Amino acid sequence: MRTQKNILIAFLLNITFSVFELFGGIFTGSVAIISDSVHDLGDAVSIGFSYFLERKSRKQPDSKYTYGYLRFSVLGGIITTFILLFGSLAVIYNAVLRILNPVEINYNGMIIFAIIGAVVNFGAAYFTREGDSINQKAVNLHMLEDMLGWFVVLIGAIVMKFTEFKLLDPILSIAVAVFILVNAIKNLKEVLDLFLEKTPDNVNINEIVEHIEKIDGVLNVHHIHIRSIDGHSNYATMHIVTNSDHHKIKDKVRNELEEHGIGHATLELETPDEHCHHHECYIEHNENHSHHHHHHHH
């Protein structure tokens, strides 16, 4: 349960910090800091969501959710991603307003804040670096961005202190926001692929069919479906035509699937004489499998 504890720690750090930061932004007059605090607050809220949804996603399957609760973790990723999208657009909007009417900024205060900010965020990023759920990745992405945001603010403050180039403040906040926007869109695509039941990227269906059909006693494989529930658990169903011992065949097929990263499979075995109608079977239309129709029965 490390993931959960880490998310909680990150959440508390972020919430406390974004409030502290808001005052800092007002005190120094820096839009980069204020927009960063809004962004941090958004992060904290989304981390809170992630925390509860991640906990829910660990529940075992039951009669209400027979596939288990793994997708709840993905849901956390979606909410987080949308908060990021809106947050970065808001930051860009505010920065543009600032470019149109620049203001006085307290650079020394800004430098001190940026240093504290970078340290706190480094702590949070360090806590959430392990974890492989999409949710956890989204949380860690927040932390890294926040840290990046602070380095940018720090460098910006130092440069402005010595050059009086006030426009740098909003320009930097736009740069950070664009970076966040791009990452959020990438994240969103990953999530949509899951919900559209796209075959997972690390799975090659044709290769799997080829390997299974090489197994001694397997005459044909069809109706093969592979989906991912949460981005790393893959799940497959298929029909296998065989005239050998069903138990042996099942074991062999399951082993083959495990080598392809599929830990959970539902296999239906058929004898050659109950062949399902070819025109309804999906994979048999692939030209390269057509020779399987002419299997001679031993």
Image: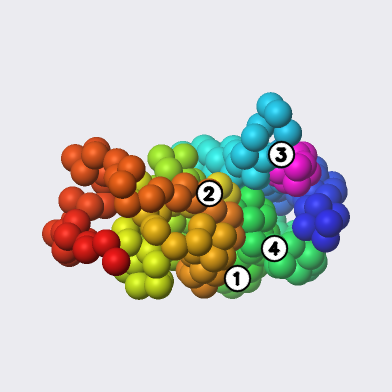
Cα gap from disc 2 to disc 3, whole angstroms: 16 Å
Q: Residue at 43% across / 43% down in the picture? A: 197
Q: Total of numbered circles in the picture?
A: 4
| In contact (CB < 8 Å): disc 3 and disc 4 | no
Q: Is residue 55 left or right of residue 271?
A: right
**Range of residues picked out in magenta:** 50-60
Tag nearer the camera, 1 or 4? 4
| In contact (CB < 8 Å): disc 1 and disc 4 | no
Which is more N-terminal, label 3 or label 2? Answer: 3
Cα gap from disc 3 to disc 1, whole angstroms: 50 Å
Which is more N-terminal, label 4 or label 1? Answer: 4
Which is more N-terminal, label 4 or label 3? Answer: 3
Q: Residues within 10 Å of mark 3 (few under 14, many from 20)?
A: few
Q: Is residue 160 left or right of residue 237?
A: right
What type is the residue that disc 1 sits on? Answer: Ile
Q: Quadrant of residue 50?
A: top right
Identify residue for label 3: 61
Cα gap from disc 1 to disc 2, whole angstroms: 56 Å
> Is any part of residue 127 visible from this angle?
yes
Considering the numbered disc 2 on the image, is that residue within a helix, a strand or a loop? strand
Tag nearer the camera, 2 or 4? 2
Identify residue for label 2: 266
Identify residue for label 4: 131
Tag nearer the camera, 3 or 1? 3
